[in-house]
């Protein structure tokens, strides 16, 4: 089996304890030599300053290639580009450009007065600076706001045409969702890499609620499997096995990169990577 490249997503800490947890996560996963790590924004841009601080710290002290999330929620165009310029000045030139979710309880996304109307406008503005490598989001299952699956493919093509170099997908529970989406994108003329987003299931009940909000389909068999595993005290074992099996299927279908949503809890991600043959020794051998 081909050993894939990996990348990891973290979220910015909001307390001292969370700061230690983030650093512990970095220490556990950095030996796997990820292509990059990314740091998220909260809904409504609520962690904007925390994201900036976490990106600066990781960029300066972790030795990792750090990508910052950037959204156009609750900010003017000038404010958003000022944040981007700040990242560039600090040496962070990789961005994950997203429209962003509205603040909790705010309902649907609303364009900020003087702000970017959508992710395509944001990507075009960032691309025009010539300073950044831009990644974007993609949805292998229908986005909750999309009219249909084709609309998601068409919108991704607009983002790539605006200057994005790569797409990272929303997580999914069955590989067929990604593979069908990849085929549809290729048919639409999208040639940029599309990297599957992988979410190792740390807590099934929490992940299930998250999936419902994101529009990610939850198969009946998965519900039943976790119900039994939780009763037997084998939830982590099942999560590792299922995630490893899905990643193996993707790799067998030609996927050469995986993007893991770590939730700042690195153990399951590390265990899945090890199961796929991604180990510190292997990565060091490749560097040598």
Image: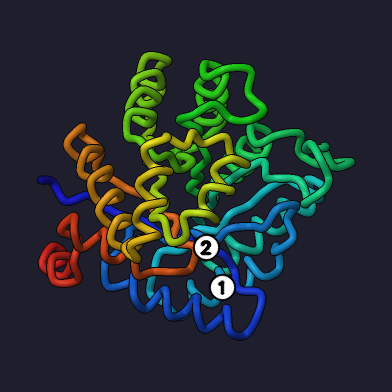
Q: Could you classify mark 2 by the number of other residues whose Cα lies within 10 Å: few (under 14), some (14-19), or many (20 or more)? A: many
Q: Say what secondary structure mark 2 lies in.
A: loop
- Residue drawn at x 33%, y 57% as measured from the top left: 35
Q: Could you classify mark 1 by the number of other residues whose Cα lies within 10 Å: few (under 14), some (14-19), or many (20 or more)? A: some
Above or below, 257 relative to 17: above
Above or below, 34 relative to 137: below
Q: Which residue is mark 1?
A: 56
Above or below, 135 relative to 272: above
Quadrant of the image containing the C terminus: bottom left
Is residue 269 visible to us here?
no
- Residue drawn at x 70%, y 62% as measured from the top left: 48
Q: Are marks 2 and 1 in contact (CB under 8 Å)?
A: yes
Return the x and y of residue 159 as percentages of the image width and height.
Answer: 55, 30
Of badges 2 and 1, nearer the viewer stands 1
Q: Say what secondary structure mark 1 lies in.
A: helix
Q: Left or right: 191 with respect to 171?
A: left
Quadrant of the image containing the N terminus: top left
Q: Count numbered badges in the picture.
A: 2
Is residue 200 visible to us here?
yes
Distance Cα–Cα, label 2 vs label 1: 8 Å
Return the x and y of residue 6 as percentages of the image width and height.
Answer: 31, 55
In which quadrant of the rendered view does residue 40 lie?
bottom right
Q: Which mark is residue 92?
A: 2
Return the x and y of residue 186 as percentages of the image width and height.
Answer: 35, 20
Above or below, 257 relative to 267: above
- Residue drawn at x 50%, y 79% as measured from the top left: 21
- Residue drawn at x 77%, y 51% as measured from the top left: 104
Return the x and y of residue 123 as percentages of the image width and height.
Answer: 61, 38
- Identify which residue, 273 or 205, lies in the foreground: 205
In which quadrant of the rendered view does residue 97 lie?
top right
Of mark 2 and mark 1, the one earlier in the sequence is 1
């Amino acid at each position: 089996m081909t050993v894939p490249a990996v990348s990891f997503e973290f979220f910015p800490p909001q307390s001292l304890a969370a700061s230690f947890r983030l650093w512990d996560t970095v220490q556990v996963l950095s030996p796997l030599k990820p292509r990059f790590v990314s740091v998220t924004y909260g809904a409504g841009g609520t962690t904007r300053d925390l994201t900036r601080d976490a990106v600066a710290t990781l960029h300066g002290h972790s030795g990792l290639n750090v990508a910052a999330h950037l959204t156009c929620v609750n900010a003017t165009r000038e404010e958003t580009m000022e944040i981007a310029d700040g990242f560039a000045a600090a040496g962070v030139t990789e961005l994950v450009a997203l429209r962003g979710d509205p603040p909790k309880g705010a309902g649907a996304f609303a364009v900020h007065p003087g702000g970017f109307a959508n992710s395509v406008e944001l990507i075009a503005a960032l691309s025009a600076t010539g300073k950044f490598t831009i990644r974007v989001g993609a949805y292998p299952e229908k986005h909750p706001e999309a009219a249909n699956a084709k609309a998601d493919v068409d919108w991704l093509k607009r983002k790539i045409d605006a200057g994005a170099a790569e797409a990272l997908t929303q997580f999914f529970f069955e590989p067929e969702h990604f593979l069908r989406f990849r085929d549809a994108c290729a048919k639409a003329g999208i040639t940029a890499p599309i990297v599957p987003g992988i979410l190792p299931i740390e807590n099934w009940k929490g992940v299930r609620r998250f999936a419902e909000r994101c529009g990610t389909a939850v198969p009946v068999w998965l519900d039943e499997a976790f119900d039994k595993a939780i009763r037997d005290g084998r939830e982590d074992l099942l999560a590792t096995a299922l995630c490893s099996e899905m990643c193996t299927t993707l790799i067998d279908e030609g996927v050469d990169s995986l993007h893991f949503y770590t939730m700042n809890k690195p153990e399951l991600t590390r265990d899945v990577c090890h199961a796929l043959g991604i180990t510190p020794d292997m990565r060091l051998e490749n560097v040598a």
